[in-house]
Image (cartoon, grey):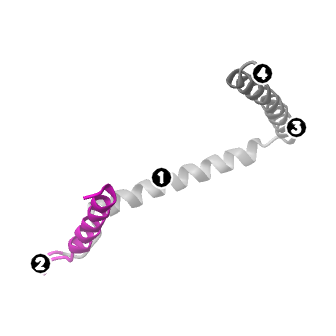
Amino acid sequence: MGTRHILALCVLLLVLGFEVQGTPTPLQGEAAGPTLFSQMQESLLSYWDSAKTAAHDLYRKTYLPSMDEKIRDVYSQSTAAMTTYTGIFTDQLLSLLRGEE
């Protein structure tokens, strides 16, 4: 059996396993209320949203246009320098790999 056949068989068995497993249905005696995992997930999402809102408010309060300009300038200069040095490194590597002509 080739590698492709084994891989296809594994994928097929995986898909069938998930299909057989399906979604669990609550038993008659169980309440269909939220599970512990869903409660934890909702709690973590609410903490995340509150932290995100606090960070966004702090950013809005401390936003300085002059500082934003400086950061953008430094970023553009550093990317230009990196582009130059990457080009030099690429040329040196290619000449090293090509050897003496």
* The quadrant where residue 29 appears: bottom left
- Residue pictured at 77% horizontal, 27% vertical: 91
Q: Would you name the residue on which mark 1 appears?
A: 47
- Label 1, label 2: how far apart the Cα atoms are: 33 Å
- Label 4, label 1: how far apart the Cα atoms are: 64 Å
Tell me which numbered mark, 4 or 3, is placed earlier along the sequence: 3
- Label 1, label 3: how far apart the Cα atoms are: 32 Å
Q: Would you name the residue on which mark 2 appears?
A: 29
Tell whether position 23 is magenta: yes
- Residue pictured at 72% horizontal, 27% vertical: 94
Amino acid carrying mark 1 in the image: Tyr
Of tags 4 and 1, the one toward the viewer is: 4
Q: How many marks?
A: 4
Q: Which stretch did the figure color magenta?
A: 1-30
Q: Residues within 10 Å of mark 2 (few under 14, many from 20)?
A: few
Q: Residues within 10 Å of mark 1 (few under 14, many from 20)?
A: few
Name the spot of residue 85 as percent of width and height, x first. 78, 26
Up the image or down, 81 lies above or below 36; here it is above
Label 4, secondary structure: give it: loop
Tell whether position 9 is magenta: yes
- Label 4, label 2: how far apart the Cα atoms are: 83 Å
- Which quarter shows the C terminus? top right
Of tags 1 and 3, the one toward the viewer is: 3
Label 1, secondary structure: give it: helix
Q: In screen coordinates, is 98 left or right of 46?
A: right
SS assignment for the magenta stretch, majority: helix
Q: Would you name the residue on which mark 3 appears?
A: 66
Amino acid carrying mark 3 in the image: Ser
**Numbered tag placed on residue 101 in the rendering:** 4
Label 2, secondary structure: give it: loop
